[in-house]
Structure formats: structure tokens, C-alpha cells
Image (cartoon, rainbow, N blue to C red):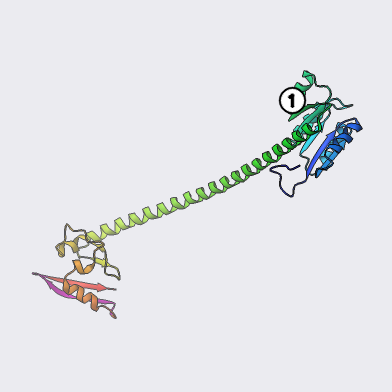
Amino acid sequence: MEIRYKPVDKEIRILCVDDERNVLKALRRIFIDDDWEILTAESAAEGLEILEQEDEIQLVISDFRMPGMNGVDFLGQVRERWPDTIRIVLSGYADAACIVAAINEGQIYKFIPKPWNDDELKVTLQTALEHYFLQKENRELLEKLRASNEQLQKMNDTLEQLVEKRTEELQFQNQALKISQTILDALPVGVVGFDFDGMIVRTNAAAMNLLGQENAFVVGMNREEVLPEQVNRMIDSLEEKRCLHGDIQVGDRTLRYWLSR
């Protein structure tokens, strides 16, 4: 009998508990053609011992009336200690009080009266086992999802810390740039800074005034578009020397320059 959702390497174990040996033999005979391990116990106490010893029992079928511990008390303990195990009552005493007690205390999957129909019993057990493995698969998926969410939360927390740290660094750098620009603007000499490609990256108010660009925004422009031709030629000649200085005539003004690489 094929059981959906069952892992390929998982063996099916069913425990049958009944004080009548002929009932246990009949249950074994029903599943003789199935690749299932049918365990039997003639009392609730023996059934609990088997559950403690075996690795995993997916389904327990128990009689209702047995000497000593009855089926309701037995299945109640099974529910407390092995809550994932499917619990079924198989009994000839199908009165209402019996059914209510079994459902309330043992939280059984199904109540099957004796005598049973073999085919119907096999279908019931097949459905119960599929329910067991589906529930187990869902729990495992939920656990993986929970673990993934925890890992994602840790990553988000780390990212938030990195963003916060980077934001503080950028705020500090921006503040430093503002201070440096304030200092530059306070200098009585003009300053123009540009990168190796000739793009202007820094100026001050004095430089803009000397160049006649008081209201222009030249940062990001090429120096050749802004600086006088004489200055650009001197910059182009600044190869081996680290620093040049001198005077140049720009219009009616004489400018003293310092060029540094």
C-alpha cells in the first residue's frame, strides 16, 4: 500500500494494543502483504514499554476496555508523551460515553467499532499515515522557515548596523567637507583643485572672484573650460616638477599662482 508524503527511507511502524490475542493476530494478518512493521502488545503497560523502546511509531491502535489501564487512559498518555503519533480506538463498546471520553482525553484520530471491515480499516490507516507524514513535513518546513527567518533577521540587524555606521561616517565626512569649504572660502587667496583628468573638484570664493565666475558653479567642469589659457598651459607643462609658481597677467590684473601636484 502506497503512503503519500512518506520519506523513502522511513519505515512504517504500527502498534496494536489489545488484551485479546486473536484480535492482534487478525490485525497482523490484514497487513501481511504491506511493508509495515506491526508491533503488538496485550496490555497498555506493555504498549508504553514498546513506545519507549522503539525509535518512531507513527500510529497506535488500541482497544477501549482492557484489564488495568483502559484504552482512554493509555491513549491519553500516548498523546502527552508522543503527541505526533496518530491514535485510533478499535472497540466493540461503541457507546456514546466511550466515544466522548476517547475523543476528549486521548484526542483520537478515529473510533472504529468491532467487528471491522478489513478494506475499510486499511483505507483508514492509509489516510491516517498520510496525515501523519504530511503534518510532519509541514512542521519540518515551518521549522526551516523559522530558522531562515531568524537568519534573515540577523542579517537585517547586521545590515542596519552597517548602514547606521556608514551614515555616521558620511555625516562626519560631510561635516568635515563643510568645515574645509568654510576655511577655503575664508582664505584671501584663490584655490582651485582638480583631479588628474582635469575635472574641477574644489574652489573657493576668492578663486571665483578672480576668475570672474562669482555666480557660476564650476565643480564638475573641466579646468580648460574655466581657467585662463595661460594657466592651463602651465598645468600641462607640470610633469616632472612637483610645484610651480609665478605671476601671470589676466586682463588688467596680475595674478600670482602656485601649482602643485
Q: Which residues, given as a range, are shown in magenta?
A: 241-253
Instruction: Give the image quarter of residue 104.
Output: top right
Q: Position of residue 256 (x, y in %)?
A: 17, 72
Query: Is 246 one of the magenta-colored residues?
Result: yes
Left or right: 5 as drawn, with respect to 20: left
Report the predominant secondary structure element of the magenta stretch: strand
Report x, y in % for residue 36: 80, 43
Q: Which residue, as the protein is rendered here, is positioned at the far bottom? A: 240
Along the horizontal axis of the image, is 155 left or right of 100? left
Q: Is residue 160 magenta?
A: no
Residue sitting nearer the eye, 208 or 15: 15
Instruction: Please report the residue visible at 57 percent of the width from the left and 48 percent of the height from the top.
Output: 151
Quarter of the image for residue 20 reads: top right
- Residue pointed to by mark 1: 103
**Mark 1 surroundings: few (<14), some (14-19) or many (≥20) residues within 10 A:** many
Dot 1 falls on a residue whose secondary structure is: helix
Quarter of the image for residue 189 reads bottom left
Residue positioned most to the top: 96
> Three-letter amino acid code at disc 1?
Ile
Q: How many marks?
A: 1
Residue 158: where, in percent of width, then height? 51, 51
Above or below, 100 relative to 215: above
Residue 50 seen: yes
Q: Image point 18% across, 62% down: which residue?
A: 208
Residue 93 versus residue 255: which sits nearer the camera? Answer: 93
Left or right: 208, with 14 as reference point: left
Q: From the image, which quarter does the N terminus lie in? A: top right
Image quarter in which the C terminus is found: bottom left
Give the x, y percent position of residue 260.
Answer: 27, 73
